[in-house]
C-alpha cells in the first residue's frame, strides 16, 4: 500500500546536516519526496512510498541526526504523487 505524508519539523534542525540526513535515509529506504528549509526556521519533508517504509522514515525524521534537537513534528496526510526521486530543495 502506498502512502504520502508531509512533515513540518521544529527545533534545532538547520545547520546540523538535517536535510542530508533525511535524503540519505530516504534513498536507503527507497522513499521518494523532498526536504527543504523554510524561512521560519522549520524543515518541511514530503515522503511517499510503501506505507511501512514511509512510517520508518517518519520515525527517523522525528529523531534526526546527532546534533539536532527536535521539539515538534506536525504530520499531515497527502495525496500520492508517484515521485521518482528524493531531492533537497532550496527556497
Image (cartoon, rainbow, N blue to C red):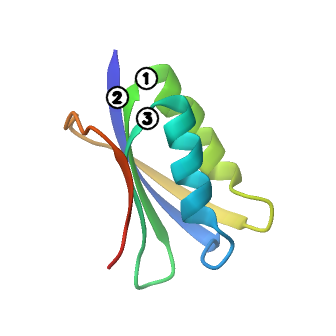
- x, y percentage for residue 8? 46, 61
Q: Rounded to the nearest whole Å, what is the CA distance between mark 1 and mark 3?
A: 10 Å
Which tag is nearer the camera, tag 2 or tag 3? 3
The secondary element bearing badge 2 is classed as strand
Q: Residues within 10 Å of mark 1 (few under 14, many from 20)?
A: some
Q: Choose between 89 and 46: the one closer to the eye.
A: 89
Q: Position of residue 74 (x, y in %)?
A: 48, 55
Circle 1 SS class: helix
Q: Say which residue label 2 marks.
A: 3
Relative to 45, say whether 50 is above or below. Answer: above
Q: Residue at x 47, y 32 (%)?
A: 54
Question: In the orientation shown, which residue stands out farthest toward the top?
Answer: 1
Give the left or right position of residue 88, taking residue 9 as reference.
left
Distance between mark 1 and mark 2 Cα atoms: 5 Å
Look at the image and tell me in which quarter the C terminus lies.
Answer: bottom left
Determine whether label 1 and label 3 are within 8 Å by CB. no
The image shows residue 15, relative to residue 21, as above or below, that is below
Tell whether label 2 touches label 1 (CB within 8 Å): yes
Helix, strand or loop at mark 3? loop
Which quadrant: the N terminus? top left
List the residue tagged with mark 3.
Answer: 31
Amino acid at each position: 500500500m502506498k502512502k504520502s505524508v508531509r512533515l513540518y519539523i521544529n527545533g534545532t534542525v538547520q545547520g546540523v546536516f538535517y536535510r542530508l540526513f533525511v535524503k540519505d535515509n530516504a534513498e536507503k529506504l527507497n522513499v521518494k519526496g523532498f526536504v527543504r528549509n523554510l524561512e521560519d526556521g522549520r524543515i518541511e519533508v514530503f515522503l511517499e512510498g510503501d506505507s511501512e517504509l514511509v512510517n520508518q522514515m517518519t520515525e527517523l525524521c522525528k529523531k534526526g541526526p546527532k546534533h539536532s534537537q527536535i521539539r515538534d513534528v506536525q504530520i499531515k496526510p497527502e495525496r500520492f504523487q508517484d515521485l521518482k526521486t528524493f531531492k533537497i530543495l532550496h527556497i
